[in-house]
Amino acid sequence: MLAPQFLRSKFEAALPYADYVASGTPDQQAMWKATHSRVSLSASQRTLVASFNRRVNVLVSSGLWCGDCAHQCPMLAKIEEAHPAKAGSDASPGIRLRFLNRDAHLDLADQVKICGGHRVPTVIFFSEDFEFVSLLGDKTLSRLRAKAAKALGASCPLPGAELPADELASTLQEWIDEHERVHLTLRLSTRLRTLHGD
């Protein structure tokens, strides 16, 4: 089980998005930056994320070398940019996103295996006080559908190929949906409502 003290220690050891990307090779940084430059939230998506009035902590077990991470993690960064939590307070509303290298933190990766494997990215959502809420890993549904169509179909994509615009948009929406689901779980939590008096 992902205990709050364990999640807190991993979160404190993790890096913000820009620092994490900067730790990669020039080729890795270029892959991540290419997706980041293509992703933008719509006005309604930004308004939704900006309405979050609970802290959503997000920890990503990732690999800079991973194509799925390079395609999806910049989306997580754009979501955080729409409503970053203020530094210095665990309870300030918004999103705080951090990244860990999976291979350097196998003690975490071992606890969040998907289908028996160390998948990346694996995204762990938890409350302001580091109580586990949700885990989503490897790929969103749109990414899984696209991967299945390519891997099980007549052709396969070139490694590192740019995501088609429609797949990019649907994957971004699914990540936003998961952030909203987690936020609503936190917002409706009896424990947190008692704590915040709302």
Image (cartoon, helix red, strand yellow):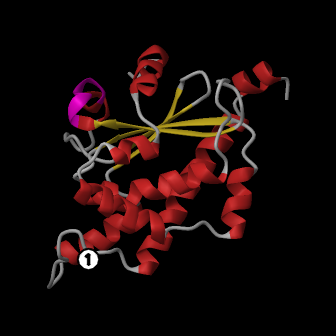
Q: Quadrant of residue 96?
A: top right
Q: Is residue 121 visible to us here?
A: yes
Q: Above or below — where is 138 with respect to 38?
A: above
The one of 99 and 55 positioned closer to us in this rendering: 99
The one of 7 and 74 positioned closer to us in this rendering: 74
- The stretch in magenta equals 103-108
Q: Above or below — where is 88 with respect to 15?
A: above
Task: Let me know if residue 46 is in the magenta part.
Answer: no
Seen at 54% across and 23% down, the residue is: 130
Locate the N terminus and report the quarter of the image it occupies.
top left
Locate the C terminus and report the quarter of the image it occupies.
top right
Q: Amino acid at mark 1?
A: Ala
Determine the main secondary structure of the stretch shown in magenta.
Answer: helix
Q: Position of residue 92 (x, y in %)?
A: 71, 31
Toward the right, the furthest residue is 198
Toward the top, the furthest residue is 5
The residue singled out by tag 1 in the image is 149
Seen at 77% across and 27% down, the residue is: 193
